[in-house]
Image (spheres, coloured by chain):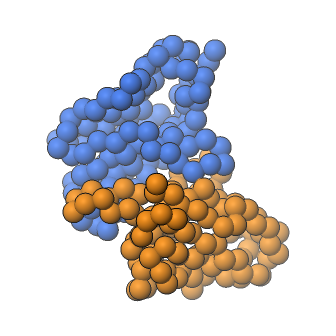
Chain colours: A blue, B orange
Amino acid sequence: GENVEQHPSTLSVQEGDSAVIKCTYSDSASNYFPWYKQELGKRPQLIIDIRSNVGEKKDQRIAVTLNKTAKHFSLHITETQPEDSAVYFCAAISYSSASKIIFGSGTRLSIRP
Amino acid sequence: GAVVSQHPSWVICKSGTSVKIECRSLDFQATTMFWYRQFPKQSLMLMATSNEGSKATYEQGVEKDKFLINHASLTLSTLTVTSAHPEDSSFYICSANHERGASYNEQFFGPGTRLTVL
């Protein structure tokens, strides 16, 4: 079945440094890749997404890259701030399979002051 | 716009009782909603796809007789955990599919329901 792998499971970076989270997916029909930020006890919040016809997308300090051939996509956060501390989930969706979101296992990001 | 609510936000019940959780899309219609379960420090696991007017589609390993899903209208889906046991204690989150065009669907998540079974 569909599978999304995410690494690392935990990540600690110094405030101001960059953080990178990587994911791979198995379903070649996946065509939409959202990234979510989840704070403890709250709902996931969409922070950025990328579609399969695009290789890179940037929104201020956040960027996402997609390599369809290798089935890899990554989240890059630059100039990290304390409020970036949270759990981040990558996900893959194939609209041909009823838009089911397959989540990665999550990365707990901690920003050291 | 695109707000999804869940009720209740938290519930504590005795083992053996049933608990109903509601998921509502407040300002849009959703023919498809999804139910997820999230255990502490783990990812969201899709339980089932709720389809308005038809039976839900359950993921492998999810007992359909234990987790009853009803999607009776375009704005409401309910999840009933029947004969709840302590191992059913979890954070349950729904999402609703907002169709923004032929090829662009965006999902909006509810705030979640924390279920504790004593």
Q: Is residue B61 left or right of residue A102?
A: right
| Residue for point 43% across, 20% down | A78
The answer to whether residue B26 shows anywhere in this view is yes
Residue A53: percent from left, percent from top: 17, 44
Quadrant in the picture for residue A29:
bottom left
The answer to whether residue B64 shows anywhere in this view is no
Residue B76: percent from left, percent from top: 52, 75
How many circles with numbers are drawn on the protein? 0
Position of residue A63 relative to residue A94, above or below, is above
Query: Where the C terminus of chain B falls, by quadrant?
Result: bottom right
Position of residue B60 relative to residue B18, above or below, is above
Q: Is residue B105 left or right of residue B23?
A: left
Position of residue B100 relative to residue A65, above or below, is below
B6 or B45, nearer to the observer: B6
| Residue for point 56% across, 69% down | B23
A15 or B3, nearer to the observer: B3
A22 or A35, nearer to the observer: A35
Residue B2: percent from left, percent from top: 46, 57
| Residue for point 57% across, 76% down | B78
Residue A38: percent from left, percent from top: 56, 43
| Residue for point 73% across, 62% down | B10
Quadrant in the picture for residue B38:
bottom right
A49 or A96, nearer to the observer: A49
